[in-house]
Image: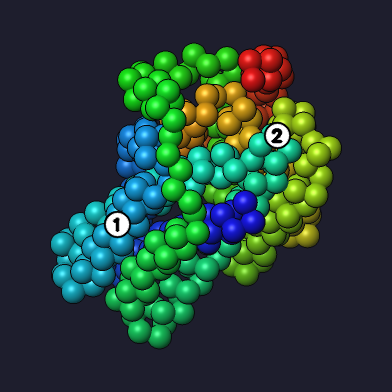
Amino acid sequence: MTRVLPALIVGQITLHAAMAGQRMAAPLQALEGGRSAWAVGVLLALFAALPVVTALAAGRMADRYGYHRPVRVAVGCTVMGAGLALTACFLPGWWQFLLLCLGAAASGVGTNIGLIAIQRTAGHLAGDSTERLRVFSWLGMAPSLANVVGPVTAGFMIDAGGFAAAYGLMLLLPLASLWIARLVPQVARPATEAKAGDGSNTWDLLATPGLKRLLVVNWLLSASWDVHSFAVPVLGHGRGYNASTIGLVLGSFTLAVTLVRFVIPMLAHRLQEVTVLRFAMVLTGAVFALYPFAGTPWLMGVCATLLGLTLGSVQPMIMSTLHHLTPPHRHGEAIAFRSMAINASSSVMPLAFGVVGTALGPGVMFWIMGAAVGSGSWVARGLQRAFAAAEQRA
């Protein structure tokens, strides 16, 4: 595991950074080309919308072929996405926007295929619950780093050489995933697992005890992440804060997420997944209830930090529980269901937030989401029984 886990982390960073950089650059290029805010919203939605449709196929591919073939497909799609965006730089008008949209869809699909394969492989590195928490905590830092590396690098390249230079670099980044993949060993699936996994109905997996509960918990916490990213800029703008102040509030959230994922591996032997999930949901609801009353940037920063600590702890717990509840030869499909919920939330919820925020104000968004995620903690309570039953089956 000493060589494989760093290889998985680097592979995810390079794939995700390429998509994140493209996701930052494409809307800017579309706006410079005269596209409306609505058109830019459609462009951004495509990064998450198509992965909802393709996630189950990606999960089954990961279960059938392991790590290497899905990662090659992921790199191909991500490179194609950046290549389409690069080609768009040399086309006029709506042709440019069309290629930006196609590039967004291809890049989103590629990153998601890679994510599913990487997370499945990471889960198989661990022998018990404690090791899984450590593995997924380290792996959970990859998106945070990628969301810094990709946009910052793309921004510098745009300033230095234009959009084409930025997309050219985003096209090269995923190739590092192929190079680092050499450190991940080829693992053949046992014939009994292959037979069980290839002929089964994917949707039957939802009958696994506790899985539907876990997906509901995952959706509530993912939506909480989305509403914070959406509502903080709206709330800060309404109070007259400048962009740097709003950025610092959001930055304190990201810093807290990274910090808690750094600490979890040291405390993994003391943590129980379901207990942490329930505590995180209750605390998230409480922070959302208080957020609209945070009348200064400092108080908003404190709320953002607390929220980052709670939501940042969730991903390792959910991934560990997911691997514990589901059969090993179907982990890819289980991760695909989680991916579908996250990407559907990222595609649809901002539209709902926009309607609610316009009609009732950003403070009401916090209260509605806080009530939903806080009351949803009773759903997580039932996971304890499913977790214990899975331990007995093992």
Residue 28 vertical position relative to residue 37 in the rendered view, above or below: below
Q: Earlier in the sequence, mark 2 or mark 1?
A: 1
Question: Callout 1: helix, strand or loop?
Answer: helix
Residue 345 position in % (x across, y down)? 47, 37
Q: Nearer the viewer, mark 2 or mark 1?
A: 2
Residue 298 vertical position relative to residue 127 in the rendered view, above or below: below
Query: Left or right: where does residue 255 sit relative to residue 8?
Result: right
Question: Observer-nearest residue: 182 or 345?
Answer: 182
Q: Can you tell which quarter of the image residue 117 is in? A: top left
Question: Callout 2: helix, strand or loop?
Answer: helix
Query: Left or right: where does residue 10 sit relative to residue 195?
Result: right
As shown in the figure, which amino acid type bears the numbered disc 1?
A: Gly
Residue appearing at x 20%, y 64% in the figure: 96
Residue appearing at x 44%, y 48% in the figure: 186
Residue 313 position in % (x across, y down)? 70, 43
Q: Residue furthest bottom?
A: 160
Residue 191 vertical position relative to residue 269 in the rendered view, above or below: above
Is disc 2 in contact with disc 1, using a CB cutoff of under 8 Å?
no
> Residue 129 — which label?
2
As shown in the figure, which amino acid type bears the numbered disc 2?
A: Ser
Q: CA distance from mark 2 to mark 1?
A: 34 Å
Residue appearing at x 36%, y 19% in the figure: 200
Residue 261 position in % (x across, y down)? 70, 51
Q: Can you tell which quarter of the image residue 318 is in? A: top right
Residue 167 position in % (x across, y down)? 33, 71
Label 2, residues with CA under 10 Å away: few <14, some 14-19, many ≥20:
many
Q: Which residue is mark 1?
A: 76
Label 1, residues with CA under 10 Å away: few <14, some 14-19, many ≥20:
some
